[in-house]
Amino acid sequence: MTLKQLEAFYWAATCASFAVAAERLHLSVSSLSKRITELEEALGQALFDRSGHKAALTDAGQRLVPQARELLAAADRVRASMTETPGLRGRCRFGVGELTALTWLPRLIAGVRAAYPDLVLEPYVDIGQVLEQRVADGELDFAVIAGRSSRVNIASTPIGQARFAWVASPSALDGETRMTAALLARLPLVTLPAGAGTSRIIDDWLAGREASGERLCCNNWGAIAGLLIEGMGVGLLPSHWAEALQAEGSLRVLLGEPALAALPYSFQYRRDDTRALVACLRDAVAAAVDFSAPCRLP
């Protein structure tokens, strides 16, 4: 029995599929399967039931998972204690929302590449709900997501917050200066899809209000800004974007009661992932985060 065999077993057992586990370990699926088979032969027990469409853990496999996790974590601690000059190499797949991608993601990548030139970064952009699932499935090493995870196997470290403002085109407002339920009944709400972080602060603001009306959902911040500028409805934009667009006359910032709460963001990763990679990237994210960084607007 070897650490490589245990590693192959553990990630195959805890990732969404053998293919995801193999990609995480930079192996072919056949190589991953071979290591697991060798481990089964060494232990004299089947760890996966392969009779169905998808391999499932046997009772022996389920018993081995926590033991394998402890052994692999101990091996990581030994490696870390023996490394004189810490360095990261290989690939790091991580997820961010579009707001991060448009503001401070370039700063993060530049900083990480300077500190760890042998590490290849592969960012993936999507809404938080999708990113959290991909972290849980082992497809991503970490993600920067609005809010905290409710999953017991996902750890969340607060890293910053973003602020938003209600806005609409002056041509659509007919002199209105405040955000009200009546305005929402008249104008469509232009917003990101459900599952995006901003859905939380919108729902909190709407709580207790009799506000019903049309929703125009779009999964791109640039397109949302464009729709709002064209007078297609009322919606949220990051505060510094809203102020810049108001200064040029394209949009008007609306006063709302109560004021919109700030949207907290967290660094999310699997609790069983004890690699130095995760800790180092968490520190890099904390140093780079800045949701008020400039970005290009339509």
Image (cartoon, grey):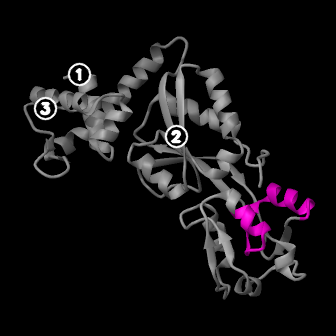
Which of the marked residues, 2 or 1, is nearer the chain's N terminus? 1
Expressed as whole percent of the image width and height from the top left, the position of residue 107 reads 70, 35
According to the picture, the residue beneath numbered tag 2 turns out to be: 94
**Within-10-Å neighbours for mark 2: few <14, some 14–19, many 20+:** many
Residue 106: name its quadrant: top right
Left or right: residue 62 versus residue 141 is left
**Within-10-Å neighbours for mark 1: few <14, some 14–19, many 20+:** few
Which of the marked residues, 3 or 1, is nearer the chain's N terminus? 1
Position of the N terminus by quadrant: top left
According to the picture, the residue beneath numbered tag 3 turns out to be: 40
Judge depth for marks 2 and 1 and give the one in front. Answer: 2
Magenta stretch? 224-249
Left or right: residue 39 versus residue 284 is left
Mark 1 secondary-structure assignment: loop
Q: Viewer-proximal residue, 151 or 292?
A: 292
> What is the spatial separation of the Cα atoms under label 2 and label 1, in whole angstroms?
29 Å
Residue 228 in the magenta stretch? The answer is yes
Residue 272: name its quadrant: top left
Mark 3 secondary-structure assignment: helix
Q: State the residue at coordinates (68%, 85%).
A: 209
Q: State the residue at coordinates (14%, 31%).
A: 37
**Within-10-Å neighbours for mark 3: few <14, some 14–19, many 20+:** some
| Amino acid type shown at disc 3 | Glu
Mark 2 secondary-structure assignment: strand
| Amino acid type shown at disc 2 | Phe
